[in-house]
Amino acid sequence: MLNQNSSTYRICFATILMMLFFALPSVIRAQTVTGTLQGTVTDSKGDVLPGAEVVVRNTETGQERSITTNSEGIYTATFLPIGRYSVTANAQGFSRVAHENVEITLNRTRVIDFTLNPSGVTEAVMIAAEDAPINTTNAEIKGSLNATEILDKPTFNQSNFLTLAETFTGFQENPTSGQNNPTASSGSSINFNGTGTRGATFQINGVNNDDSSENQNRQGASLSTIKEFQVITNNFTAEFGRGYGAVVLVQTKSGTNELHGDGYWYHNDSALNAASNAFTPGAIKPVNRRNQYGFTTGFPILKNKLFGFVSFDQVKNTGAGGYTRDIFLASERNPSNWFLQTPANDTP
């Protein structure tokens, strides 16, 4: 009986592992967390080169992939983690050509074409990367912010990324409960082009982040952890089926072969405010302090193989938001009224 139970346990465990093995690629290989690189390899006369080898290498993590061009000289590298790459093309009898510092961004297709010269003309060609061209691969209307742009934007709450949406065309402030107000019914939403506060859908690292009740954003992320923030406002592809107003994509940072990170501290103090309010002269100024601090760090565990990333964010509010004081009426301050035996209409 013991052997039978042990055997059943092993079979169940192996089945679960197989299910995870086949399920993980479908999760990892989502366009919403990666980018695509494609192009054509030709010779100096413009003829396509089938069978040419294209090597795509992530310069941050060392991840490398080799692709062979098809009969039309076209190569496609799908599901590339966002970051910077070195792309090299080589064919028998032709010199090697390399494009350096090619940036792959979130949910975009980057086109890099190669022209190879006969190997006798030149040994190798190195091409510095150019800025990403205008999107010609699909009709999506979208805008993005990278990590530097995100941290440069003045923001009151560093743990809520919804305020980043204000940067893009078509954004409309929530008219009822304001923006970035999780305590309100529709305060964790965005509204684009008059589609309403329930028309958007949210994803973090490709995982749906919608509240099932009112289609609001459910989980926040510290701005310091975000590598790219993107808003799609029109012509969604088939993978975005839950929103008709806008699609918000958040991709967080990860570890690399180099140690990197940052720290931050945001301080708000009532001591820095004016001594008194113009509308209530002489009133005691309430004490109110807000401190938000944290850090992020990415590091290698096994070079080119395994990496770690740690984030910490904390908010502390001290003091009171206001003071309450009792004010006695003129009749209540009159001693002759203190010992009246009449009903308590004017009792202090």
Image (cartoon, rainbow, N blue to C red):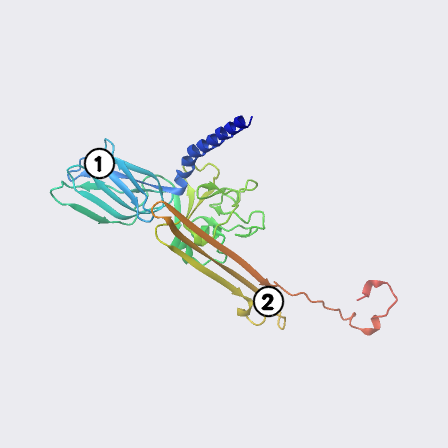
Q: In the picture provided, is 145 more to the left or to the right than 292?
A: left
Q: Disc 1 versus disc 2: distance between alpha carbons? A: 69 Å
Judge the density around disc 2: few (<14), some (14-19), many (≥20) Cα neighbours within 10 Å.
some
Residue pictured at 27% horizontal, 37% vertical:
67
Tell me which amino acid carries mark 2.
Val
Q: In the picture provided, is 123 more to the left or to the right than 229?
A: left
- Seen as rendered, the residue at the extreme front is 2
Compare residues 202 and 62 and report the one nearer the observer.
Answer: 62
Residue pictured at 60% horizontal, 69% vertical:
285
Residue 106 in the image: state x and y as whole percent.
Answer: 38, 45
**Where the C terminus falls, by quadrant?**
bottom right
Residue pointed to by mark 2: 287
Mark found first going from the N terminus, 1 or 2: 1
Viewer-nearest of labels 1 and 2? 1
**Where the N terminus falls, by quadrant?**
top right
Tell me which amino acid carries mark 1.
Ala
Placement of 242 over or under 146, stated as above or below: above
Placement of 217 over or under 285, stated as above or below: above
Residue 304 in the image: state x and y as whole percent.
Answer: 33, 46
Compare residues 305 and 84 and report the one nearer the observer.
Answer: 305
Residue pointed to by mark 1: 52
Residue 208 in the image: state x and y as whole percent.
Answer: 48, 41
Mark 1 secondary-structure assignment: loop
Residue pictured at 48% horizontal, 54% vertical:
312
